[in-house]
Each structure stands twice: as C-alpha cells, then as structure tokens.
Image (cartoon, rainbow, N blue to C red):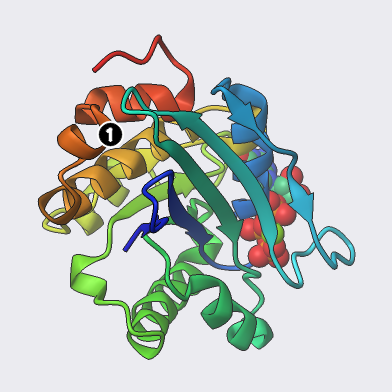
Amino acid sequence: MPDLETDSSRLTFKLVYYGPALSGKTTNLVSLHDCLSPEMKGEVMTLDTQNDRTLYFDLFPLGFRAPTGILIKFRLFTVPGQVRHDSTRKAVLSRADGVVFVADSLRTQETNNAESFQNLSENAGRVGLDFDDLPLVVQFNKRDLPNILTEAEIVDRWQGAPWPLQFASALNKQGVVETFADLLGEVYTRFDPEMEFQTLLGLSKSAFVAGATGSQEVSP
Ligand SMILES: Nc1nc2c(ncn2[C@@H]2O[C@H](COP(=O)(O)OP(=O)(O)OP(=O)(O)O)[C@@H](O)[C@H]2O)c(=O)[nH]1
Ligand SMILES: [Mg+2]
C-alpha cells in the first residue's frame, strides 16, 4: 500500500526490481535514471558492492507534484540476485507496492529465472504481500545477446500469465522506460479502488505514468 502522509502532503510508492543474479536489475535502474526526466530525480545510490554485484541494494528516488499539490515520490530498489542473499531480498521486498521481475534471456539461465521467480512468490508470502494481488511486470532482458530464447518461445511459455511482458536490452537503454511505465500502470490500477487517484491526485492513469516518466506535461 503506498504511504500517504497523515497531512496528505506526500504519497510514496516503493518499487522493487527482482530477479536472478546478473540478469541486469542494477543496469535497469542506471539506464532508467539516464532516460527519465521527471521534475525530481535523485542519484542512483549503490551500496556495498563488490565486483559490481549488488550485496545490499541500489536505490533511485524520483518524483513529481500532482495537480492537487500532493508530492508523488517513487523509491526504486534492486535486490541482490545471488542466492545466498535471501534475507536481504526479503528485507528489500517488504512493503513493495510493485515489482519488475528481470529475467535473463540467455538460454542457459532458464533454471535460474524459474528458481528466482519461485523465490519471489515465496518471499512475497513471507513478508506479508499477496502475490496474486501484487502489481508485477515481467521483463526479459539482454535481447542484444546471441543464444537467447526467441520472443515467440517466451510468449509461448508465459501465455496465460496475467502479467505484462516486456523485452529489453537494459545495457542499450531499450525497453527500460516501457517496463517502468507498465509497472506504473499496474500500480495505479491496483491501488486506485482504495485511494481514488483521480480525486486524490487529479491524475488519470496515463497522466500518472506521464508525470512519473517526464514524458509529457502533466495534465489532469
Ligand atoms: N549484453 C547485455 N548485458 C547486460 C544487459 N543488462 C545487463 N548486462 C550485463 O550483465 C551484467 C550484470 O548486470 P547487473 O545489472 O549488475 O545485474 P544484477 O541483476 O544487478 O546482478 P546482481 O546485483 O548480482 O543480482 C553486467 O556485466 C551488465 O553489463 C543487457 O541488456 N545486455
Ligand atoms: Mg545488482
């Protein structure tokens, strides 16, 4: 549930990039930072890294002011994908309002993807999130590499799944903003019945997405 300050001055969303080790979660955040131009954009903070592996988490804050005056803030995290960092993954996932699952398109990574997705659903339960109700987007990253699953194979395997599917090459800044925009749409849809965003923020779903990505003037 997004955090609304008691005086209704600020609404904060926590969004988490989850997935197996080396799938490109941190690269997604860094590329997204380069591509977005919202009103407010903080620096990417990378903590406790060793050989470029995330040991704790990466954080990237951004935000914009809604027409009703409320400050909308997004806190974007990545989890460390290495199997041994499960307790950190749980801590980062806790109280998430939405998740991007970054899968690795390489054929050799199919088992790691599946295990990490299973780990996401289990950890969601452990930290009190209802996985079936969690805004989620599935991204297949590293589309620029050889020896990857084809789009047709991936679509075939994920057909019937309820989540938006995106193809990306985070290293080349492709598909990164689209993935984030999909997640914003899912988050708006999920919490709109309780929070009534049109009244609270004065924003339709598309205006909410546009405001967060800086893709156009924010209008009601
Ligand atoms: N070719 C290619 N390489 C990528 C892409 N995205 C990420 N990488 C590379 O994959 C490696 C791992 O990327 P990271 O973003 O650090 O992966 P991560 O998911 O944060 O890894 P952990 O923090 O260990 O869980 C790096 O060498 C990246 O440059 C991509 O789209 N294409
Ligand atoms: Mg990382």
In which image quadrant can residue 208 be found? top left
Residue at position x 59%, y 37% in the image: 170
Relative image position of residue 77 (x, y in whole percent): 59, 57
Q: Residue furthest front?
A: 7
User: 40 or 185, which lies in front?
Assistant: 40
Q: Please determine whether, in this image, residue 30 is positioned above or below residue 95.
A: above
Q: Looking at the figure, which quarter contains the N terminus?
A: bottom left
Q: Can residue 145 be seen here?
A: no
Q: How many marks?
A: 1
Mark 1 crowdedness (10 Å alpha carbons): few <14, some 14-19, many ≥20: many
Q: Left or right: where does residue 177 sit relative to residue 30?
A: left
Q: Quadrant of ligand 2?
A: bottom right
Q: In the figure, is residue 129 to the left or right of 62? A: left
Q: What residue lies at 62% left-to-right and 44% top-to-bottom?
A: 61
Q: Position of residue 124 (x, y in %)?
A: 37, 79
The answer, for residue 212, to whether it is visible in the render is yes
Q: Amino acid at mark 1?
A: Leu
Image-based side of 92 in relation to 186, left or right:
right
Secondary element under disc 1, as helix, strand or loop, is helix
In this view, the residue in front, 25 or 191, is 191
Whole-percent x, y for residue 3 in the image: 40, 59
Quarter of the image where one finds residue 108: bottom right
Front residue of 88 and 50: 88
**Pointer 1 residue Cβ closer than 8 Å to ligand 2:** no
List the single residue furthest toward the right. Answer: 51
State the residue position of label 1. Answer: 201
Residue at x 45% of width, y 66% of height: 110
The one of 187 and 7 positioned closer to us in this rendering: 7
